[in-house]
Image: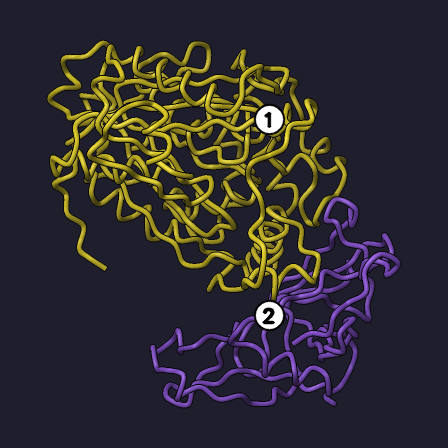
Chain colours: A purple, B yellow
């Protein structure tokens, strides 16, 4: 349960804060301690993302799914730059262009994220990136990925 | 998936169409008013009336719309696949007619995003609230929709195949050349590649002129059995093949950003029609963005995977080129109210009837309307043809 938030004087968060899906509570809880979890199917030995109540690869049930801590290492699959943060309704970059990317985790799943640590226009497909965390207002943390880092 | 059954081939035909657009980008009517007008105009075009209608397609609720129309249809179809909804309606309506579920089907679309804004009207359509995959995994990262997912596909296509911004820009340039021949197009002034590249970067690598318009627009089509079609006012436009495929909804779940589900729907539709890309006289390929049209060229087999860039750059796609694509001026220059697929069908029908005016493709007997919905998520391909193509 998320704590009641004050309203009125509290400024809107800079980020759209993600809701917690019924299948993903463990994922978001782990972010509080900086751990990136990936759901894993023990039946077909593949990663599953986003979290589900069954395996979309082999249709195994919830019993076959477990949580594993990911290495945090990933490779950029595709990256773009939002040059008009106002048009996107995004405030987290302070009005500056930012990079949105799909990254492939070592565990074989793909996530949308922001890649930080390099000028956004310099982020390319194939670049190695590593998870980093941005605090959310309720103590959860949002996984971002940064360039130029070795594995944690 | 099931084998392709060719029994649908030639079993049903579009017999009436209507659309309403304006060079100002705004219409006076909106909502149900506009929807009903389109249905009645399309029926009049066919020489039919509401009393003939026993099938209704509407991507929000066919039941509510049928009640509003006062008809009692035996076929209702509310499939909502974004921009490709109306190609899906073609496929499903043809199947329903072939199976004897109904005889006369109408499908309708109306949206007025531009005048809604200028007139201060509240839009009915809202983003779904509450926990859902897009809210949980995409929205925190500020990926603008619908443009962002298409930009990601463009970036990946560039990475894998060396596709350039200049090649994408050529699609916008060629499409504008067609728009110049259409007096109802929103934008008709010629542009060149430098104009596209000089237009403001949005979600890079897409520039403003790589993106479709935001206009009002509305349209409808009417379909009936081939037998009945031959007794009606206009030359039938037969559904020769139709197929749909979806492989994701949110972009992070798309298996391969350089290959759309059109690589499944296209070949299936062609197989049903007994045709191949070389037989196509007019390609109406949903151009929400230049990259969208490029992916269609590859996935439908007009060129090989990865060769869409050079294919477009060679000037194949404009008036007088080897492949007449988006002859109305497309979503890039003609109109784009949000779910543009209806206009693929109205233009394909007019081309096959020889009603294209200055932009008519001589001797057009086969046209493909290839709709793209959501975030390259749902592709629906309709192969349409004249009596000579049967």
The residue carrying pointer 2 sits among few (fewer than 14), some (14 to 19) or many (20 or more) residues within 10 Å by Cα, namely many
Question: Image check: B112 left or right of B59?
Answer: right
Q: Residue at x 27, y 17 (%)?
A: B50
Q: Are marks 2 and 1 on the same chain?
A: no
Location of residue B390 in the rendering, given as x and y in whole percent from the top left corner: 16, 28
Q: Secondary structure at mark 1?
A: loop
Frontmost residue, B279 versus B390: B390
Location of residue B371 in the rendering, given as x and y in whole percent from the top left corner: 41, 39
Location of residue B60 in the rendering, given as x and y in whole percent from the top left corner: 42, 39
Question: Image check: A131 left or right of B299?
Answer: right
Q: Chain of mark 1?
A: B
Location of residue B282 in the rendering, given as x and y in whole percent from the top left corner: 37, 28
The residue carrying pointer 1 sits among few (fewer than 14), some (14 to 19) or many (20 or more) residues within 10 Å by Cα, namely many
Question: Image check: B47 left or right of B136?
Answer: left
Location of residue A45 by image quarter: bottom left
Q: Which residue is mark 2?
A: A111
User: Spatial distance from mark 2 to mark 1, Cα to Cα?
Assistant: 33 Å
Frontmost residue, B285 versus B69: B69
Location of residue B174 by image quarter: top right
Q: Which residue is mark 1?
A: B215
């Amino acid at each position: 349960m998320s704590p009641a938030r004050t309203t009125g004087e509290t400024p809107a968060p800079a980020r759209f804060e993600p809701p917690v899906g019924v299948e993903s509570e463990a994922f978001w809880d782990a972010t509080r301690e900086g751990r990136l979890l990936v759901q894993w199917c023990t039946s077909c030995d593949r990663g599953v993302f986003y979290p589900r109540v069954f395996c979309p690869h082999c249709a195994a049930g919830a019993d076959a799914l477990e949580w594993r801590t990911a290495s945090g290492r990933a490779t950029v699959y595709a990256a773009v730059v939002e040059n008009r943060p106002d048009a996107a309704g995004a405030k987290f970059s302070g009005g500056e262009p930012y990079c949105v990317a799909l990254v492939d985790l070592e565990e074989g799943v793909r996530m949308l994220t922001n890649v930080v640590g390099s000028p956004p226009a310099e982020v390319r497909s194939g670049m190695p990136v590593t998870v980093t965390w941005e605090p959310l207002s309720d103590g959860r943390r949002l996984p971002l990925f940064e360039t130029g880092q070795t594995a944690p | 998936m099931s084998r392709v059954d060719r029994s649908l081939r030639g079993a049903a035909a579009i017999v009436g169409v209507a659309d309403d657009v304006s060079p100002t980008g705004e219409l006076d009517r909106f909502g149900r008013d506009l929807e009903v007008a389109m249905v009645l105009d399309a029926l009049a075009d066919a020489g039919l009336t509401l009393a003939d209608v026993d099938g209704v397609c509407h991507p929000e609720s066919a039941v509510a719309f049928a009640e509003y129309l006062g008809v009692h249809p035996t076929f209702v179809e509310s499939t909502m696949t974004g921009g490709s909804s109306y190609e899906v309606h073609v496929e499903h309506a043809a199947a329903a007619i072939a199976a004897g579920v109904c005889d006369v089907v109408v499908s309708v679309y109306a949206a007025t995003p531009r005048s809604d804004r200028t007139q201060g009207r509240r839009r009915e359509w809202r983003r779904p609230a509450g926990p859902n995959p897009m809210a949980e995994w995409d929205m925190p990262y500020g990926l603008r929709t619908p443009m962002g997912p298409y930009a990601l596909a463009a970036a990946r296509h560039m990475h894998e195949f060396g596709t350039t911004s200049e090649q994408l820009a050529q699609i916008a340039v060629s499409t504008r050349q067609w728009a110049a021949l259409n007096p109802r197009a929103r934008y008709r002034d010629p542009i060149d590649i430098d104009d596209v590249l000089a237009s403001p970067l949005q979600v890079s690598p897409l520039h403003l002129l790589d993106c479709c318009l935001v206009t009002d627009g509305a349209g409808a089509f009417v379909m009936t059995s081939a037998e009945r079609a031959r007794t009606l006012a206009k030359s039938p436009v037969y559904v020769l093949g139709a197929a749909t495929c979806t492989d994701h909804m949110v972009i992070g779940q798309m298996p391969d950003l350089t290959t759309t589900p059109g690589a499944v729907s296209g070949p299936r539709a062609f197989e049903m029609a007994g045709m191949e890309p070389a037989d196509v006289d007019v390609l109406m390929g949903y151009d929400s963005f230049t990259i969208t049209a490029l992916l269609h060229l590859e996935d439908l087999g007009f060129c090989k995977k990865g060769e869409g860039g050079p294919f477009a750059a060679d000037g194949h796609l404009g008036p007088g080129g080897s492949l007449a694509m988006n002859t109305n001026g497309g979503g890039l220059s003609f109109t784009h109210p949000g779910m543009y697929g209806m206009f693929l069908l109205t233009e394909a029908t007019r081309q096959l009837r020889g009603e294209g005016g200055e932009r008519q493709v001589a001797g057009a007997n086969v046209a493909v309307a290839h709709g793209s919905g959501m975030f390259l998520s749902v592709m629906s391909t309709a192969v349409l043809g004249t009596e000579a193509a049967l």
